[in-house]
Image: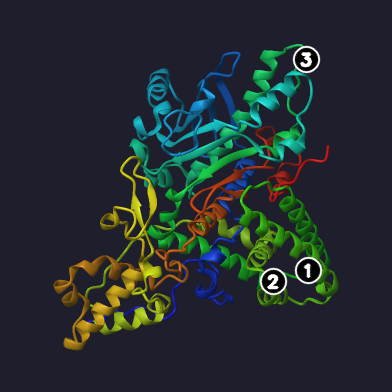
Amino acid sequence: MTTATLSVMPASTIDGQQGLPMRPADVVMQLDRLGSFHQFRLSFMRTLMRRMITEKWQIEAPVFDLDSNGYGTVVYEVQAKYSRYSFVLFSHYLDDSLRNDRVIADQWDLTMALCEGSVDQEQLEHLRANVPLQEAGRVDSRVFVLSRANRSARNFNYVVDQLAQGSQPDVNKIAEVGYLYRTTAAYGSGKLGMADWDKVRGKHRDFSRPFAAEMFTCFMLRHFSLQQADFIARQRAPDTAVVLDDQIKRYFGIGNSTGLGMAPFLINHPQLINQWVEVRETALATVLVEGQVTDEALDNLQCTAKRVIQHLDEIVTDDALQRQSNQCVHDQLQQVVLPWLKEYGASLSSWTQLTEHAQANWRVETQELINSLLIELYPQLVDRLEEQMDIVERYDLVPEMPLVELRNSIERAYDWALKIDFSQPQEQGVFWYRSEEKMEPRLGQTNIDIGEERQMPLAIGRSVRECYDAICAYLAEYPNDDIAHFLLRQPEFRGIICRIQTMANCRYGEIRENLVHKAVLPMHLLRCKLSFFGVSKFDPRSRLWVRNTMFQGAPLISDFSSPIANQLADGWQFPVKPTN
């Protein structure tokens, strides 16, 4: 009989990865480093924007039925490269006292849906009856994404008032928030009757990259928010109203509130997370090997670093730790990194000299920022990777594998988990559970909060440790048995063994931290995933949820046909206030 084995070195699914100097997982997959990732050239908003501009997507609104207060129905028709879609939006009156960004909210200023094809009157009425209900409603598989949003209390009325009076809003005031609307969810992948991911990926190539449909929904929400502000101002004062200046329009993004609901995704989809991180690390390694250190590249790096300094300086947050972190990176860029580049840049023969110096001397947040900026310099080297951010996830159990080999694999690939002493109370200080009210993930305190017996299986390190101890005890009695015989006696370990065997072929999939430690910071998980989305300006509201900004600085739909469209497509990372 053939003996199944696990590879010693994880095999890559990334084209061209072989032979590159990839950073080890015990460096990359630490929580504090994952939480220091920034949006980069291959983040989903960035690749979506390039696709829309390169492929010249056409977006028009055959239905724009709003009353003078901006309430009503809007239907946008989207002609992409491969198919036609509809973005349907309902604007509602909402009393200020009911405006709530928490997931328990049941009313919103806007609700919307992204659908395949054109929407006829019958479907529109069905959407009108269900989309405003969000989780309480039901849609069909013609819908890809369901979302909702609330007005910014600080910005929306102010901007409309200024426009109605014939004035542009003050960009300094806008910088305090950066958006007119804030979304609290973008549901997809089969939820509430919508099309599942396999259908979207297989049938609709325009949205076949991960989260492309969700990112497009947020982009269209931003587009509507700007149109609605102009429209209401014109209705209010037709003789004096002006439209928003295009530079100010670009500076507006869409706000987003993200809580614990996003955190389990990184743990429950380790193969996909491995793919995302490996693509990012491959892009970085490619730049370090092939990116020529030229005067132009050095100038571009220093220019972008100065832009980041201004970007950080303009971020407004009430969170003391985030404010301190932003200030530290700001100061390090200004006082250390730029002077270092000025002194040593001309003598660099490879960017590796910069990254190695950064790792030895600078903050983790600064290191990862520099990595993102280096990737930005070489589109010709990294853009080919944007089609490799997806993977078909599959767990495979190999029952004929000798149990001793599985034990050895755990010792090699999960040594980080075996180093944790789970007998210490602080190592099991919290547990993850799903709330009964909204079925949303929550974090409870062990021996304090109820529900521990129903906790979600997110403590991967602890599960590995328990499995390893059981295997060692079993092997003491049956040293020649395979996994099948072990699972016949202890079937409760089937799931974690399946994960161990599968993830042994992945370089970066497992987060190498104890996710039930009493001091765990879920914020790092949120920031990691959001960095791949492409968000900016993190504003933590607690250790459990964060506000951020999407598409700030991005091109407008009217820019798609501009002579400088391609330049605009990639010139909006780390947005700063317009100068005029």
Visible residue check, residue 173 = yes
Q: Which residue is mark 1?
A: 336
Residue 10 image position (x, y, % from top left): 44, 75
Where residue 11 sits, quadrant-wise, is bottom left
Q: Position of residue 127 (x, y in %)?
A: 40, 25
Secondary-structure class at tag 1: helix
Compared with residue 320, is residue 518 higher up or lower down, i.e. above or below? Answer: below
**Disc 2 and disc 3: Cα gap in Å?**
53 Å
The coloring applied to the image is rainbow
**Residue that carries the numbered disc 3 in the rendered image:** 240
Indicate which disc, 3 or 1, sits on the residue closer to the N terminus. 3
Tell me the mark number nearer the camera, choosing from 3 and 1.
Answer: 1
Q: Is residue 172 above or below residue 264?
A: above
Q: Position of residue 437 (x, y in %)?
A: 33, 40
Tell me the distance, in whole angstroms, between the alpha carbons under discs 2 and 1: 9 Å
Of the numbered discs 2 and 3, the one sitting upstream in the chain is: 3
Q: In this figure, which residue is indicated by the disc labeled 2?
A: 362
Q: Secondary structure at mark 3?
A: loop
The 10 Å Cα crowd at callout 1, few under 14, some 14 to 19, many 20 or more, is few
The C terminus sits in image quarter: top right
Outermost residue toward the left in this view: 489
The image shows residue 504 at horizontal and vertical percentages of 38, 73
- Considering the numbered disc 2 on the image, is that residue within a helix, a strand or a loop? loop
